[in-house]
Amino acid sequence: MSLYQIIILGVLVVLSGVFSGMETAVMSLNEAKVRALVKQKKRGSKALYRVKKNTHKLLITILIGNNLVNIGSASLATVVFTELFGSAGLGIATGVMTFLILLFGEITPKTFASQNAEKISLIVARPLELLSIILSPVVFLFELISRFVSKILGSKEGEDLSEEELRTVVTMGARGGILNKEAAKMMHNVLEFKETKLSEIMTPKIGMKLIDGNKNLRKILPFVIKTPYSRYPVYLKNKDNIIGILDVDDVLRFVKNNKLDSLVRRAAKPPFIVNENKEIAKLLTEFDAKDQEMAIVVDDKNKVKGLVTIVDLLEEIVGDIFEEKHHVTGYIRKVSKNKSEVDADAPIVNINKELGLKIRGGKYETIEDFVEYKLKKPPKVGDRIRLKNVSIEVYKVKNSHVHSVKIIKYKSKK
């Protein structure tokens, strides 16, 4: 056994470890992480991005390299130990090389690579790309064989997680502290988004603020100033004939140009009309593509059912952000002197204080709990509870629960 053979054997074992470490490091980085490294202009990131574009080819390249050095080291070890121990050398070579390759060619490099994946990936990306080019004919052949065998066996490439599996991952991430509460809630909302019906999030027809298109802007200006909305559906003759959407910005433009005698229908923009059965995920895409922010919802007979805004859709995903804003500005939005729109989670104590009322909620803290207790049935839009000098009307319903109410105050009868 010469020193030359020992050095070559040592180099082959080290190369085995290098290939194993490469595989662990590069394969552990996801596409988002690689893109982030490219954006940060890290050295080697572009080469890493190129090799990661075809993970199948990358894996074959690494495995070919790893197997070549493993076979080479095993063969050389067999020659060396056979020279030293004769016929017993084969068994000794197998035992020694199994130990060396497991320890220095697999366990140690893979453990180290998993802990330093980013750093190692950036270092080895260019050599890997070069090796892939050198071995490209062999890699191409193995790639064809691999895909052919996979097709025969009926294996699915890149099978996605099921929705239930993804929900479990999100829940585990939240419990493990990887995701904060807000992020986990948002991801659950995204998963539930496609299952939400348009009727659950739209403002029903009874709650719509409509404007007659044959009125002039001067007449409707006080109404627009008094109500807290930025867009209004415009109708002609009957409220199922929506002919446009009036934007407050357009009203202000007419005011600026002293054109308040113009008819509302002249200032209105064409309406965006959608069927009540449309999937809300597709509707969100259409809002973006058509540059719209409000849609009129109709049934199959073109009867108006309600309206929905892009904010309504976004609240389904980032609800907590919008709710937090409500908490800052208050749960209550004044519609007129004696009428207010109130969020379902508004504490009765706050409602009494801000509106000067004396609603006795008893053990029920929020207006939602109080209304649902009083109704003694699943709430529907338009359901009313009449108390002394106060009427509480269900304004919006979501998932069979009160989402918001309208509170109307009446003058005391003497």
Image (cartoon, rainbow, N blue to C red):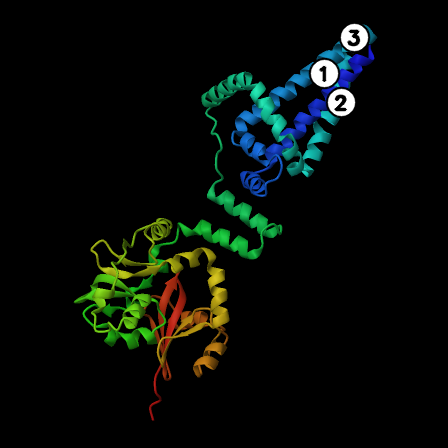
Identify residue type, mark 3. Thr
The spot of residue 117 in percent (x, y) is: 65, 37
On residue 61, the disc is none
In the image, residue 41 above or below residue 64: below
Identify residue type, mark 2. Leu
The spot of residue 190 in percent (x, y) is: 46, 51
Q: Secondary structure at mark 2?
A: helix
On residue 82, the disc is 3
Residue beneath disc 1? 73
Mark 1 vs mark 3: which is more N-terminal?
A: 1
Residue beneath disc 2? 100
Distance in Å between CA atoms under marks 1 and 2: 10 Å
Depth check, mark 1 against mark 3: the one in front is 1
| Any part of residue 399 in sight | no
Taking 83 as reference, is 231 left or right?
A: left
Q: Find residue 47 and report its image quarter.
A: top right
Count how many numbered circles sit on residues in the image.
3
Depth check, mark 1 against mark 2: the one in front is 1
The spot of residue 291 in percent (x, y) is: 34, 54
In the image, residue 274 above or below residue 207: above
Q: Quadrant of the C terminus?
A: bottom left
Residue drawn at point x = 42 percent, y = 57 percent? 314
Residue drawn at point x = 49 percent, y = 52 percent? 188
